[in-house]
Image (tube, rainbow, N blue to C red):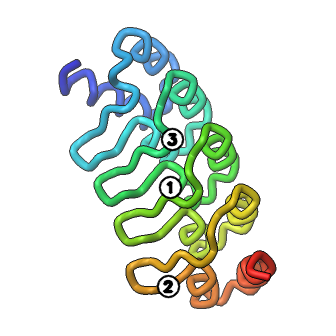
Amino acid sequence: MDSKELTFFLDACRRGDTGDITQLCQLFPDLINAADVKGFTPLIIAVYNNHPEVVDILLQNGADPNAQDLSGNTALMGASFKGYAALAEKLVAAGADVNLRNGQGAPALTFAATFGQLEIAKLLLQHGAEINFPDSRGKTSLDHAVMQENEAMVELLQQHLA
């Protein structure tokens, strides 16, 4: 594998080109978990660009759902930030760790709470997401929901604390 192949593969993931991705997965299986200079893996890129079919292909070919970019962010964190509930479900089903934390100490639940992704927060909580993880500023997911004045999120998180 050379950098040209990786660049082409990552671009195909960005575009959602399932034909190229399927072919490249077969020809160059090492590309599945390769990363660019920012640590973005094909799975992270496919999730950020909301390509569920690409995510399926990558997971079926062994993509690591817990791979982190250079900031420690995962595909699940990206889905939680962007509000891609169907992708979050796929990732959790594939073994994504709901309590993995990025370089700032934030788990996926903090992203869901901060950006008002109620459906994703429910999914994460159903799969054991920890509410009391403080980030690097000492703020928990509940604290972020309170700061955003998101009453529905605050209520959901408080129910899981009880």
Q: CA distance from mark 2 to mark 3?
A: 25 Å
Q: Which mark is residue 78?
A: 1
Asked if the residue under mark 1 is in contact with the one under mark 3, i.e. CB atoms within 8 Å, the reply is no
Q: CA distance from mark 1 to mark 2?
A: 19 Å
Residue type pointed to by label 1: Gly
Q: Foreground mark, 1 or 2?
A: 2
Question: Of label 2 and label 3, which has the lower sequence position?
Answer: 3
Q: CA distance from mark 3 to mark 1?
A: 12 Å
Q: Position of residue 59 (x, y in %)?
A: 55, 30
Q: Is residue 140 above or below residue 10?
A: below
Q: Judge from the rendering whether residue 127 lies leftward or rightward of residue 104; answer left or right.
A: right
Residue type pointed to by label 2: Lys
Identify the element where label 2 is drawn: loop
* Residue designated by label 3: 65
Residue type pointed to by label 3: Pro
The residue drawn where x is 47% and y is 70% is 106
Asked if the residue under mark 2 is in contact with the one under mark 1, i.e. CB atoms within 8 Å, the reply is no
Q: Position of residue 138 (x, y in %)?
A: 45, 86
* Residue designated by label 2: 139
